[in-house]
Image: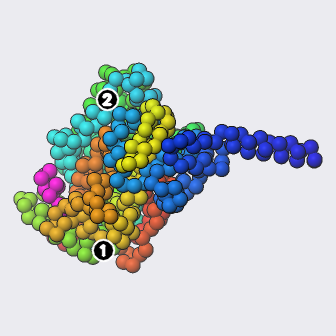
Amino acid sequence: MLALLFLWGAVVMLCCSCCFFLRRRRRPNEPPIENGILPYLGCALQFGANPFQFLRAREKKYGPIFTCRLAGKYVHFLTDSFSYHAVMQHGRHLDWKKFHFATSAKAFGHGSIDPSDGNTTENMQQTFTRTLQGNALTYLSEAMMENLHYVMVKSREAKVSSNDWVTDKLYEFCCRVMFESGFLTLFGTEFNSNYGKILSSIQENQRASILHALENFKAFDQIFPALVAGLPIHLFKSAHSAREKLAETLLHENLKKRENISELISLRMFLNDTLSTFNDKEKAKTHLAVLWASQANTIPATFWTLFHLLRNPKALEAATEEVKRILQDVSGNIGSSGNPIHLNRKQLDDMPVLDSIIKEAIRLSSASMTVRVAKEDFTLQLGSSSYNIRKDDVVALYPQLLHFDPEIYSDPMTFKYDRYLNENGEEKTVFYRNGRRLKYYYMPFGTGLAKCPGRLFAVHEIKQFLTLLLSYFEVELTNSNVTCPSLDQSRAGLGILQPTSDIDFKYRFKVL
Ligand code: HEM
């Protein structure tokens, strides 16, 4: 027994001394460092529990730049919103791709998409910009509007009589509507199904298979943070099988059986086939990465927007007015499901109230993290101070700190629907901190070269969803005094946080 205790003591001593000697020592001109007490993990557990509180506390202790050891990496956090610009200016020392490529391969299971590794010569960033913005966005948004109309209005009409209230869960509702419509928009429809006609059994089957894909998507998405943290997917049996089934749906041989595929996916299929050495499953997994990027943030963003809208009568009134104003310009019998609402690009871009509501909902729920890796040792100049950064260290920004900063946004935890409107009712773009105008005040989509290429489409999608909902339905929360669900911190760093619980609501067709 004594021998066992002695052995145990020796192991603990060894671990402690390893930790001590493996700790990084701060060198001159480096930011203050916190190694954490756990070997390898460092501060990862404390950080993961609530990044916002963790960073705020460290900011108080160390100032606007400090280093934390997180899962074997040394991460330099910059907390002052005025220093974000400096990070962008040091772009030549910082790599944004390495981290993205490695994370994508880890989570989705495809081979490296870094052209320097030789599997593909596709410049994915170029593909995304070309197919999600400019003219391509016009087509994409038109397709989304048609699909949303089908999913929200047409397919429901057949089943719901106009006077009946339908009760549902708000998050679940947003999930089903956005996933089905977004899936059809990117990946098209099965051949021979015509959404303009009465819901046929083919359409019912197609819907069932998309909703089945949604269940797999949810199972996979749930463990996404663990995969990004580096845990192998084999530890999660059912999520692993869900990912593989999703990939199967997206095999080129299956996609070729679909029509009206978006330019984004058809171009990516072509480039996979011509520029890469990926096998069929890996090609499918690159499409899964796009499916995830297109849904994982949009779904919770739609939920938060609708939730805040329904809880705020003034916001609801202003949004309804704006939708009416925009629809006045739309010819035809508005509201009749036989004559679907069509919003052109100009109309979608001329909705400042909805823009402000969406931005405010996203401000309150976004927890993305901007991450760059140092390509070499360099000196980061922040105003009059300079800090030495070592090669392979990570430089990170956590914009929730600025989104919740009371010096920028008064009463930051309160939803104010007109926060992003100026006195003329137009988009407000001027924000200050301590009397200085801010360049960066809203960053849920990242910044610089890695900025989300789908951000314009995402906002269009949510506006279209709201326009249809407000035009065709009466919608109410079951309990108008319901408290706001808290944010699920397990996804912090990855984008828009989901609610920890769902909300009951009801809707019925308006009598038009
Ligand atoms: C509210 C919804 C959305 C949010 C908040 C969001 C946010 C983000 C963020 C934070 C990034 C990483 C940027 C960085 O690392 O600095 C990103 C990347 C990306 N997003 Fe979005 N996104 C949304 C919707 C969409 C949609 C609808 C699509 C496509 C249809 C999309 C496609 C992408 C792609 C392809 C990337 C990877 C870009 C690259 O690696 O070059 N996103 N998004």
State whether residue 312 is above or below residue 89.
below
Q: Quadrant of residue 22?
A: top right
Residue shown at 50%/43% (left/top)? 29
Query: x, y percentage for residue 313?
Result: 27, 76
Left or right: 289 as drawn, with respect to 257 = right
Q: Which residue is mark 2?
A: 123
Q: Are marks 2 and 1 in contact (CB under 8 Å)?
A: no
Question: Where is residue 217 drawn, in percent x and y?
Answer: 44, 47
All told, the count of numbered labels is 2
Q: Seen from this angle, which residue lies furthest right?
A: 2
Residue 5's tag is none
Q: Is residue 344 magenta?
A: yes
Where residue 455 appears, as percent x and y from the top left, is 28, 48
- Callout 2: few (<14), some (14-19), or many (20+) C-alpha neighbours within 10 Å? few
Please tell me whether mark 1 sits on a helix, a strand or a loop. loop
Does 371 sit left or right of 410 as displayed?
Answer: right
Please state the horizontal and vertical placement of residue 177, each as a whole percent of the image.
32, 56
Mark 2: which secondary structure? loop
| Front label number (2 vs 1) | 2
Q: Is residue 61 above or below residue 195?
A: below
The amino acid type found where label 2 is placed reads Asn
| Residue 508 falls inside the magenta stretch | no
Q: Which residue is mark 1?
A: 312
Residue range of the region highlighted in magenta in the rendering:
341-355
- The answer to whether any part of residue 125 appears in the image is yes
